[in-house]
RNA sequence: GGAUGAUUAGCUCAGUUGGCUAGAGCGCUUCUCUUACAAAGAAGAUGUCACUGGUUCGAGUCCAGUAUCAUCCACCA
């Protein structure tokens, strides 16, 4: 017999087990012994940012994915889970820039592109491994031999090929467009990279000049330096007469030519009902300018300052220029009104700098252009079709609608970013020199490599980080395999499309939609069959956990304290798809207690039944006749458990699967069957216990891999194979050995009733009692068969009398349950003096408590009426006093509300 | 403004296609070191399932409306 420690100690075990798994090579499906035609099951890990440190959101994601992966591996699938990291262009560049400024006082421009990228590289080498190392701590069974990075050589190839293919298909184009420009990051932002903040703003109403006929309203007077039109509603009687006319005005020293145009989108009731049009600095205005062929005057430059040519405003920041304009308007007495309104400020999601809408040359992916290779459909149409035809399903289903809504309103995707860290755009320009300095693009070439010949310069911009991560399902599987055709082979053929994409709902549009479009474009194939969306992990007060707020629970601390299994289980149970979850340390602790329970269940069975071998195939093929009511009961329950767990996992109810498993393990298996085995020692007990325990380990393994593998490893009589590649249990084994169902619940109820009588009547522990049971003949037989259990399972029954009928015995406690009368004669069992003393003491405590309550109740009207009397008058009667105190407590509760 | 979700025990949350007395964990009360586990065991208390109607033999579950909260999208001159 081996000595197992009394307490499960994950810290000592987990790293060792993980190394053992890695050494086995079974994370890699190529090493699994499977039939040729085994189905594949593939998940790509949503790559965490290289700057990330493991947070609970990651653990939640890893726990769910590892559960799916381990389950399917045990079910005999060719199972692949691909790890990797994302270069997160803007985020990473920001971090390095901040670091540079802090440590050396330098900006990236001081260093220059090459030197700066070297700095990023240095930083990256340090941080990239951190998150991967931390992922291993959670027990994730990822195939590390296939690890990928969104910015490594292979992915670089894929990105270039994709860009060139799209360019050649005519869906990538270069165009000028108002973009959301972050003056701090010096980059454009996609619509969904903007955050809005409600703020108070000054809303100014003024005339451009003395000779302009009416006033306009704006929150941004400084941009009015670039106005080329004024829009009014065509129905607006006030302005009808001006429509079509052009005014030349002197606006604060700057000459403007303003055409009065009509547009039905202008709200007549807002401000003066007239809207100054600044095509270069507002999305809406840009669209009106396009419609009306207006001139475009850029006022604000990429540095967020007023451009040259605007008198003394030039070179000033927008905010400063605004002040100057207002001052000037006041001086000229043109400002009519100044009011405070609430509006939404657009902010860069990375650095919270207000964004400037600016016109700029950018690369776009057209989502509406129809293509031959997609059967004369556009990316948008294909991406909608895939979901509408349910080739891709969402869990939970409601996200299908959100995806479709978003997809239908999708505009062309701006893929160029003015940052240095990322995939450089494979576009090359030949520049024409004009008057020494000014340059214009003469020729554009888009290709995999720099074209031959002199004078070609590569586009300085890089690609949106979602461009590379959008290709993640196939770029990780070796696409492109060659640059000539799109035939699939190897991993790509075997594992694509993948089965599930499991990710957070917040990047449904950002990432999922792009993956669908890119996979359809590149392979004419969906990237995954199912999208499982998890919610966010919030702290115990329902707030977002973030590093900056410092309210996060560090999963690594938790793993160290309670073990990875406990953290995983806490993330799985009570977590439902698409819903946010709150988490607290207490919750994790409670699951640590469970892993410890599991450890001790095994410890007990191992110590007492180590001799009992498993039934081999021969034994199982015949019915085992010697089994008791309890045996049949537990085995039938277990059969149900196997069925329901399988169904739950299939239908993505991981929380419920875990809860049912836990309920069976703890309440049925440990608390009853194991206890029964201490008294009902039939020949097969050990075998049954070990069989069920072994299969329980198999079923628990996808949830809590470390403790189960560790128990498995230590089980005596097991062959030294890893639990992770064991087969998921089947019900046949159990159906074969057990015949028919048994109602054991009746016996359970009787036992509970006896225990109840003991506590209620305060019969001292260990004191033997006599029990009289009155019931019908049939039940009596059934009870007789289980006499040993009824006498021993923490009931301490010395004598059990079973009668078909009879009178109520004198001076005895009684309970009626399931048609059975249970009596326990009390004479001589309770020491009355002792009881009295005890009651007295309890009463003392109650009095003290009541006094405390009274103090609390002071000043409350309730006090005048009763409580003192109620509590203290009733003090002689313990029961009544208790009831009254409860009433007061409730009253106090209601006062709080 | 549009959409989606939430509202169940003191707290955090489960609850499948409507079905018996609505569950779990933590907390609370009482008892217990009893052949593994005090990180345990046993017993117990606590619910107007947000509200108002409707459908039904039957509603936490389905439908309509209301309230509160959250999130997303759009607008923001």
Image: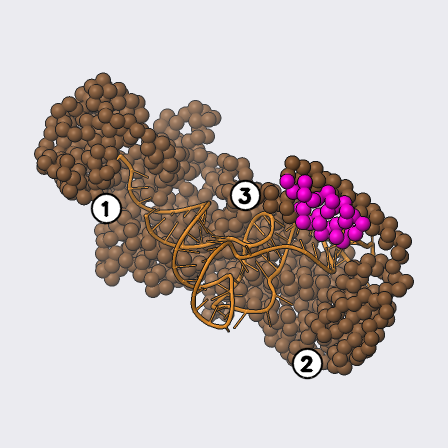
Chain colours: A brown, B orange
| Image point (17%, 38%), residue name | A232
Quickly name the residue at label 2.
Answer: A623
Quickly name the residue at label 1.
Answer: A173
Task: State which region is magenta.
Answer: A861-889
**Chain-order first, disc 2 or disc 3:** 3
Q: Residues within 10 Å of mark 3 (few under 14, many from 20)?
A: few
Q: Considering depth in this image, is A527 or A324 the residue closer to the camera?
A: A324
Which chain hosts label 1? A
Q: CA distance from mark 3 to mark 1?
A: 47 Å
* Predominant SS of the magenta segment: helix
Q: Residues within 10 Å of mark 1 (few under 14, many from 20)?
A: some
Do the residues indicated by labels 2 and 3 lie within the same chain of the protein?
Answer: yes
Which chain hosts label 2? A
Q: Which mark is residue A541?
A: 3
The image position of residue A868, as x and y in percent, is 73, 42
Q: Quadrant of the N terminus of chain A?
A: bottom right
Q: Secondary structure at mark 3?
A: loop
Above or below: residue A264 compared with residue A812: above
Q: Quadrant of residue A854?
A: top right
Q: Quadrant of the C terminus of chain A?
A: top right
User: Is residue A449 among what the camera can see?
Assistant: no
Instruction: Single out the residue that lies furthest toward the top.
Output: A331
Q: Considering depth in this image, is A422 or A357 the residue closer to the camera?
A: A357
User: Is residue A150 among what the camera can see?
Assistant: yes
| Image point (64%, 66%), residue name | A695
Which chain hosts label 3? A
Above or below: residue A367 compared with residue A342: below
**Is residue A869 a member of the stretch shown in magenta?**
yes
């Amino acid at each position: 017999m081996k000595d197992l420690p009394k307490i499960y100690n994950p810290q000592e075990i987990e790293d060792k087990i993980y190394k053992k798994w890695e050494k086995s090579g079974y994370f890699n499906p190529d090493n699994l012994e499977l039939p040729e035609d085994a189905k594949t099951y593939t998940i790509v890990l949503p790559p965490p940012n290289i700057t990330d440190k493991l947070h609970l959101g990651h653990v939640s994601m890893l726990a769910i994915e590892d559960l799916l992966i381990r389950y399917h591996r045990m079910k005999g699938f060719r199972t692949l889970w691909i790890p990797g990291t994302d270069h997160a262009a803007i985020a990473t560049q920001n971090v390095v820039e901040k670091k540079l400024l802090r440590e050396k006082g330098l900006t990236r421009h001081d260093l220059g592109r090459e030197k700066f990228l070297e700095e990023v590289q240095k930083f990256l080498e340090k941080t990239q491994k951190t998150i991967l190392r931390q992922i291993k701590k959670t027990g994730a069974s990822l195939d590390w031999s296939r690890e990928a990075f969104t910015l490594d050589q292979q992915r670089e190839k894929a990105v270039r090929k994709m860009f060139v293919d799209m360019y050649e298909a005519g869906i990538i184009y270069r165009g000028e467009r108002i973009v959301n420009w972050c003056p701090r990051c010096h980059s454009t932002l996609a619509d969904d990279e903007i955050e809005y903040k409600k703020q108070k703003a000054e809303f100014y109403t003024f005339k451009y000049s003395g000779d302009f006929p009416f006033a306009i309203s704006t929150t941004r007077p400084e941009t009015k330096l670039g106005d080329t039109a004024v829009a009014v509603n065509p129905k607006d009687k006030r302005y009808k007469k001006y429509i079509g006319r052009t005014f030349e005005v002197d606006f604060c020293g700057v000459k403007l030519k303003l055409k009065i145009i009509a547009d039905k989108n202008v709200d007549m009731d807002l401000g003066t009902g007239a809207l100054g049009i600044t095509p270069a600095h507002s999305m809406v205005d840009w669209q009106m300018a396009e419609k009306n062929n207006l001139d475009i005057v850029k006022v604000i430059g990429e540095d967020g300052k007023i451009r040259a040519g605007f008198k003394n405003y030039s070179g000033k920041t927008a905010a400063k220029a605004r002040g100057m304009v207002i001052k000037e308007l006041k001086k000229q007495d043109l400002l009519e009104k100044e009011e405070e309104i609430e509006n939404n400020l657009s902010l860069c999601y990375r650095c919270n700098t207000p964004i400037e809408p600016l016109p700029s040359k950018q690369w776009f992916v057209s989502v509406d252009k129809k293509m031959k290779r997609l059967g004369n459909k556009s990316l948008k149409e294909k991406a909608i079709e895939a979901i509408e035809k349910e080739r891709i399903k969402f869990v939970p289903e409601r996200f299908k609608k959100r995806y479709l809504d978003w997809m239908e309103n999708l505009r062309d995707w701006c893929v160029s970013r003015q940052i240095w860290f990322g995939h450089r755009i494979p576009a090359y320009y030949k520049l024409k020199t004009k008057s020494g300095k000014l340059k214009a693009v003469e020729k554009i070439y888009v290709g995999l490599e720099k074209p031959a010949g002199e004078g070609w310069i590569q586009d300085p911009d890089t690609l949106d980080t979602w461009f590379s991560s959008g290709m993640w399902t196939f770029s990780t599987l070796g696409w492109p395999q060659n640059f000539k055709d799109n035939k699939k082979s190897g991993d790509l053929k075997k594992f694509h499309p993948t089965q599930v994409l499991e990710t957070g709902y917040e990047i449904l549009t950002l990432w999922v939609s792009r993956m669908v479009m890119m996979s359809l474009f590149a392979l004419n194939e969906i990237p995954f069959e199912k999208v499982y969306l998890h919610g966010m992990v919030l702290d115990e007060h329902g707030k977002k956990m973030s590093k900056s707020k410092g309210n996060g629970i560090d999963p690594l601390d938790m793993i160290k304290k309670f073990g990875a299994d406990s953290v995983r289980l806490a993330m799985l149970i009570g977590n439902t798809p698409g819903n946010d979850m709150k988490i607290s340390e207490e919750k994790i602790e409670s699951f640590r207690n469970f892993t410890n329970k599991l450890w001790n269940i095994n410890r007990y069975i191992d110590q007492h039944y180590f001799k009992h071998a498993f039934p081999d195939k021969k034994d199982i093929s015949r019915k085992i006749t010697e089994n008791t009511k309890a045996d049949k009961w537990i085995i039938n329950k277990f059969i149900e458990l196997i069925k329901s767990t399988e169904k739950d996992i299939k239908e993505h109810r991981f929380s419920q699967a875990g809860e049912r498993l836990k309920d069976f393990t703890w309440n049925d298996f440990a608390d009853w069957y194991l206890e029964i085995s201490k008294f009902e020692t039939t020949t097969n007990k050990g075998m049954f216990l070990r069989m069920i325990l072994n299969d329980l380990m198999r079923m628990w393994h996808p949830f809590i891999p470390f403790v189960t593998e560790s128990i498995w490893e230590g089980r005596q009589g097991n062959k030294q194979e890893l639990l992770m590649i064991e087969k998921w249990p089947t019900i046949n084994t159990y159906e074969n050995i057990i015949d028919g169902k048994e109602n054991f619940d009746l016996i359970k109820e009787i036992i509970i009733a006896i225990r109840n009588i003991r506590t209620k009547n305060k019969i001292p522990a260990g004191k033997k009692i006599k029990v009289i049971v009155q019931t019908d003949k049939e039940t009596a037989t059934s009870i007789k068969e289980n006499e040993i259990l009824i006498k021993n399972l923490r009931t301490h029954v010395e004598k059990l009398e079973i009668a078909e009928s009879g009178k109520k015995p004198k001076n005895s406690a009684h309970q009626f349950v399931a048609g059975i009368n249970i009596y326990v004669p009390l004479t001589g069992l309770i020491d009355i003096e002792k009881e009295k003393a005890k009651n007295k003491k309890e009463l003392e405590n109650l009095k003290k408590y009541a006094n405390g309550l009274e103090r609390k109740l002071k000043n409350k009207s309730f006090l005048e009426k009763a409580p003192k009397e109620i509590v203290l008058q009733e003090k002689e009667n313990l029961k009544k006093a208790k009831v009254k105190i409860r009433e007061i407590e409730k009253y106090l509760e209601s006062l709080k509300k």
